[in-house]
């Protein structure tokens, strides 16, 4: 059986993908196999339908929003680099990587700010850079379903927006969103250990 690096060499642009995402070659190889397994028709790309067949996404109330994040700008096809770029947001933060990071390099995809940007776009349904009360309400409806009354949901949405909205414009900007979550351990909560 060949070495991991020789098998990873079959992944197109493996070195640049590894630099951009921070994934090890072994992780990229596992993700490449997963990507190819999801691509049942061997098209070389994934569609929304391919991702909808992932059981965990199918039952996740935000599954459609998460799938949307794989297809920015309305694209219909997801190649392997795009697939791992999105998954890199969920790669655990490695303290050693943070210490050795060159400040001239772009911020890693799994940094706190990029994890927050990813979470923010799940709420910012119209992509205008703000989370309105209406958007907050829509996401809350997805997350809690019928377990809470409409009146309770509206109250939660109002209170959430009011608490985070520092400039009084009735919506939550990204900076307000980030500040409202400053005490939350986003690095841990938005990490999947298998994605190292």
Image (tube, helix red, strand yellow):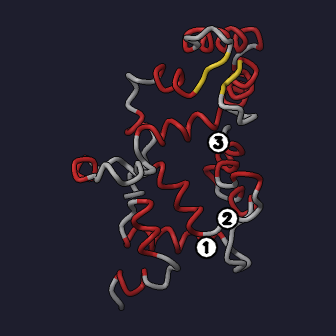
Q: Label 3, on which residue?
A: 60
Q: Looking at the picture, does residue 165 appear above or below residue 89?
A: above
Of tags 1 and 2, the one toward the viewer is 2
Within 10 Å of disc 1 (Cα), the crowding (few <14, some 14-19, many 20+) is few
Q: Residue furthest bottom?
A: 1
Q: Position of residue 105 (x, y in %)?
A: 37, 54
Labels in figure, total: 3
Q: Quadrant of the C terminus?
A: bottom left
Q: Circle 2: is it few (<14), some (14-19), or many (20+) Cα within 10 Å?
A: many
Which residue is drawn at the image coordinates 40% and 57% (left, top)? 194
Distance from Cα at disc 1 to Cα at disc 3: 21 Å
- Sequence-first tag of 3 and 2: 3
Quadrant of the rendering where the N terminus is positioned: bottom left
Question: Along the line of sight, which residue is nearer the eye, 134 or 49?
Answer: 134
Tell me which numbered mark, 1 or 3, is placed earlier along the sequence: 1
- Tell me the residue that label 1 is attached to: 37
Q: Which mark is residue 52?
A: none
Mark 3 Cα within 10 Å, few/some/many (few <14, many 20+)?
Answer: few
- Asked if the residue under mark 2 is in contact with the one under mark 3, i.e. CB atoms within 8 Å, the reply is no
- Is residue 127 found left or right of 33 in the rendered image? right
Considering the numbered disc 3 on the image, is that residue within a helix, a strand or a loop? Answer: loop
> What is the x, y in percent for residue 180?
48, 19
Q: Position of residue 187 (x, y in %)?
A: 38, 39
Gap in angstroms between the C-alphas marked 3 and 2: 20 Å
In this view, 157 is above or below 60: above
SS at circle 2: loop
Q: Name the residue tied to disc 2.
A: 78
152 vs 33, left or right, is right
Q: Quarter-wise, where is residue 71 in the image?
A: bottom right
**Secondary element at tag 1:** helix
């Amino acid at each position: 059986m060949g070495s991991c690096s020789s098998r990873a060499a079959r992944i197109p642009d493996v070195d640049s993908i590894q630099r951009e995402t921070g994934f090890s070659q072994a992780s990229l190889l596992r993700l490449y196999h997963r990507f190819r397994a999801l691509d049942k028709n061997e098209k070389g790309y994934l569609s929304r339908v391919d991702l909808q067949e992932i059981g965990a996404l199918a039952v996740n109330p935000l599954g459609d929003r998460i799938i949307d994040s794989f297809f920015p700008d309305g694209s219909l096809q997801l190649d392997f680099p795009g697939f791992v770029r999105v998954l890199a947001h969920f790669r655990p933060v490695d303290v050693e990587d943070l210490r050795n990071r060159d400040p001239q390099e772009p911020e890693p995809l799994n940094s706190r700010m990029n994890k927050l940007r990813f979470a923010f776009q799940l709420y910012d349904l119209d992509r205008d850079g703000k989370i309105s009360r209406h958007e907050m309400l829509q996401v809350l409806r997805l997350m809690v379903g019928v377990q809470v009354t409409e009146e309770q949901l509206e109250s939660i949405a109002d209170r959430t927006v009011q608490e985070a909205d520092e400039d009084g414009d009735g919506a939550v900007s990204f900076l307000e969103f980030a500040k409202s979550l400053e005490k939350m351990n986003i690095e841990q909560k938005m990490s999947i250990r298998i994605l190292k």
